[in-house]
Each structure stands twice: as C-alpha cells, then as structure tokens.
Amino acid sequence: MNVATPCNVLMLYPRFLAESFWSFGESCKLMGVRRPAAPLGLITVAAMLPKDWTVRLIDCNTQPLGDEDLAWADVVFTGGMLPQQADTLRLIELSRAAGKPVVVGGPDPTSSPHIYEKADFRVLGEAEGVIDEFIAAWESGTRSGVFTAPKFQADVTKTPVPRFDLLKFEDYLYLGVQYSRGCPFTCEFCDIIELYGRVPRTKTVEQMFVELDTLYRMGYRGHLDFVDDNFIGNKKSLRQFLPQLAEWQRAHGYPFELSTEASVNLADDPELLELMGAANFFGIFVGIESPDPATLVAMRKKQNTRRNIAESIHKIYAAGMLVTAGFIVGFDSEKVSMAEAMIDFIEEAAIPVAMVGLLYALPNTQLTRRLEREGRLHRGHDLAPTIGADQCTDGINFDTLRPLRDILTDYKRVLEHIYSPAAYAGRVDRLMTLLDRSRQRPELAEGDIRSRVGAMETVHRVVTALPEARGPLWQTFMNCAKRDTSSARIAVQMIAAYAHLGPFSRKVIEAIDGRLAALDEEPVVAAAATIDATAARHLA
C-alpha cells in the first residue's frame, strides 16, 4: 500500500425516513435520547482507515448536515440498510452536487449495487476484506471504482476497535459491539447468510475485552447490545468467552446490562443459559416467525420445529432474560385465518414486544430467487425496491397464493389484539411472574427513592399521552412494584416501549385499512377499463 496522505473523511449515517417498528421515537423521548442504536458499522470502518486521516461522523437521524461539513470533507462515506436506501441516495446526490466524491457501502449496497451507480465508489461486502484495496486506489489518485470483498472470508480477528470516540453517547438508548458474524441456519427469507455466510466467525476473547475496556474507560455505562446475527451460532467459542465475560463484569462492578439476538434453540442449552445469566444478559431477540410447524418447515427454519416454542421461551425467562420476538404473516403455507393461532401463541408465550410484519422478499435471498423463478415477484423489485421503513406497511411484494385480502385481514387482526392496552399490559404482568432475575446482578440503586419516583414519572407520562391505556398500564406497574424492584424496573421499560408500539400499531392498522380499501376498488377499476375498451372498439 502507498503511504497514506492526510484526508478529511465525512461519514454520513442515513436517516430512516419513515417511522418503523424499530424507531421507538416516543420511547426515546421518554428516555431523553434521540435514537435507539448507534451506527456501529460506520465507526468500525472508520477504525480501518489510515491513522492520519481525519474522520467526522454525522448521524443524520440525530443532527443536521451543514454546508460547512461538506465543504470540510475531501471524501464522503455513506451507506446502510434497506430502510435507509432513500436517504442514502439523497446524500449521494447532495455530496456530488457539492463536488465531493462519495464512497458507498453496507448491507443494502452490497445486496443491490445497481441502485447506487451514482456513487463514485462502491465498496461491497465486508470491509475487512476490501478496504485496503480502496485506500490504495485512493492514495494513487483513483477517484472512482467498484471494490468487492471475497465472500465470507473477512478475518474478524483482525477487525479493529470501533471508533467509539466519534459517537455522542447521550444521543442513544444503547451502544453496540459485535462478537460474531454469520448464522448456521438457512431461513429462506433471510439475507444474513447471503451477506455473511453460514459459518459464524468470532472475534478473539482478547479483542472483545479491548472493546469493553475502551467503553468502560470512556465512561459508558448501561445497556450494551451484542449485534450478532446469531449470538449462539458458534457455541464452542461462546462457551470459552462467556465465563470470562462474567468475570470481567464482576471485576468491573457490572457496568453493562447486555442484550443480543439468538435462535430459539438457546433454550435447549441450560449451560449457555446459565453462562449468559451470569454475564448479565437481560434481553434476547428471537426470530419465531410463525407458530405453525408446516410453515416453519416450508421457510426452512428447522431450529424452531420439533419443539413447544412457548415452553422454550419460558425457559429463557426462567434464566432471567426477557424475550422480544419477530413474527411474519404472508407465507405460502399459511392456513386459512392464521390470526388466532398467532395471537394465542403470543399470549401463551407472554411476549410483550412482538414485532409482527408482513413477508417481504428482500433482494438477494432464497425467497426472492424462488419467487422470480415462479414469476410471482412484483415487477420492478430488482430495479428499485419500494419498502420505506419495514415490512409492517410495505410488505407482500409478490403475488400471494392465499388471497391478499385474507392475509391483510389476518395481519390487522393480530395487531389489533396484541397492541390493545389490556392485552399488552397483561403480557407484561405475566412476563414478570415468569422472569427469574436471581442470576443477574441486581440493578444499581435498587430501592433508591429517586429511581422509584423516576419510574412512576415515566409511567405517568405514558398514560397521560395514551389515556386509553391508563388503567391497564398502571395496574401492571403496581402489580410488579409489589413483587420486587427489579420486576418494576423492567415493567417500566416495557411500558415506555408501549409509548411507541401502541400508536405505531394503530398507524399500521390505518395503512392496512387503506390497502384493503384499494383492493375493494380494483374490481370497479377493472370494470371501468373493460367498458372503456369496449367503447373504443365500437367507435373504431
């Protein structure tokens, strides 16, 4: 590589333009922050750049981009996920209009590089495998090009500590770190295995502690999320890491409360559950997708079959970790009117935060390729995906086997029930009876009068904004407060989440009503077109 010369790099994290399930806007306001999560990908790339390059990060979700920022930059880096696509394209246009070369990368540009042709540089795939090639080209005077990393070959043991110093910690509900990449399963609708492969690669234990030590020295405390695609994908490595993580937490006074994403077969491993509890994990996101075994088999989610999923979730609760879960409506194999089965499962499992969306064929997945072969993928999908935020309102971008009206009606029915105040509050209450926090570190300031007053203030603000939820949410909070302070604290977090989930679910229901109304109009439009065609033939 040529010797690097100083360069001003402006990193722009694109906006999530539309409100989504994951935006938690009102909940963030209650917690005094701007966004749930920080842009870990960009600050990781920033750490791979030459030491004498100066990097400035602007998260467009939390602060404005000024003309002076673009004027300062020699080059602009941007990119992100599919829900950020529209703003990424806007930032590319804005930067180029200011005469600044643009480097784009990340999951969506990697999956759909043709959409980002206006960027000067496209850096595709995992940055570790290609960033040096880009830097060498830039240093040699090259000002455009496509750089593609070998698939699934990035050595994450060489990944540097992310540039946490570029973040404003106070803007975010939590920060993230990454231990592993990839997932061993083959879910048809998922793009993780297309981006990162089926053989999970892990950082070394030493690497992870350098990252944790860095955050600790910088004064960060609180919620830290392991953003892994499947935290338990490489159990052998994890069994070596977790005992040392628990010891690190103990030695440092448990500065971090941990969360992550894992497959439901975590419940089959009592040792891992015990180790995660000892390390102070408090929350797990699990992709459940459907309670129907036939649908799980059809989507190739074998890890969810041959089990009672609700019992598996309860085992995770018994280990002291709450579960948030993902569900999807719209699979080919769904039975007529699957809404009640999904509602019954969510209630039985006592999952308060259930992300229920419509199936969306993501670019470069097994599902998309199958639908293309069958001629069912909606025209234009490969040229410009239209999804705005997530699949809640924009899902089903293909011709369905089951009548679309039935799918949308079922979806609406699920949302109407699970995010009604009484149903949501009831699941929070039942969760607290199942959650055994005895393995985890008791939260600091438990029993402190200020934390109690703060909890009551949070609940009061939620029910003031949502008077229809006042009775159920207050009752749940009081029930939990009578049990123990840890229970009440988690209940408050769930109630704060409802400040977003309640109103957002109603907005989604309104959007689904609009889609249903449009379906009602289709026969009228088709009839009018037939009449017009007939009249035209007579006139001819």
Image (spheres, rainbow, N blue to C red):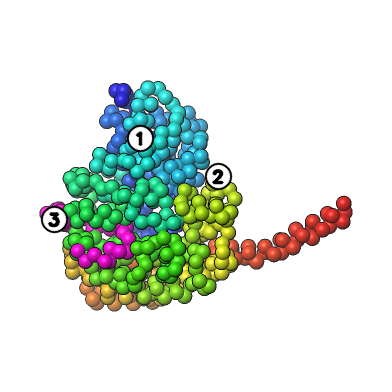
State which quadrant residue 68 falls in. Answer: top left
Q: Examine the rendered structure and indicate whether residue 63 appears above or below residue 319.
A: above
Label 1 sits on a secondary structure element that is loop
The Cα–Cα distance between marks 3 and 1, rounded to whole angstroms, is 36 Å
**Label 2, label 1: how far apart the Cα atoms are:** 26 Å
Is tag 2's residue or tag 3's residue first in the polypeptide sequence?
3
Residue at x 40%, y 73% (from the top left corner): 345
Q: Which secondary structure lies at badge 2?
A: loop
Q: Are discs 2 and 1 less than 8 Å apart at CB? A: no
Badge 1 crowding class, 10 Å Cα cut-off, few under 14, some 14 to 19, many 20 or more, is some
Report which residue position mark 1 lands on.
130
- Dot 2 or dot 1, earlier in sequence: 1
Residue 88 is covered by the magenta coloring: no
- The image quadrant that residue 164 belongs to is top left
Per the rendered image, the range of residues in magenta is: 242-271
**Residue hosting label 2:** 383
Q: Residue 175: horizontal and vertical position, in percent?
A: 29, 51
- Above or below residue 425? Residue 386 is above
- The number of numbered badges drawn on the structure is 3
Q: Quickly name the residue at label 3.
A: 247
First reached walking from the N terminus: tag 3 or tag 1: 1
**Other residues around mark 2 within 10 Å, as few (<14) / some (14–19) / many (≥20):** few
Query: Given the image, on which type of amino acid does mark 3 rest?
Result: Glu
Q: Amino acid at mark 2?
A: Leu
Point 48% across, 55% down: residue:
367
Amino acid type of the residue tagged 1 in the rendering: Val
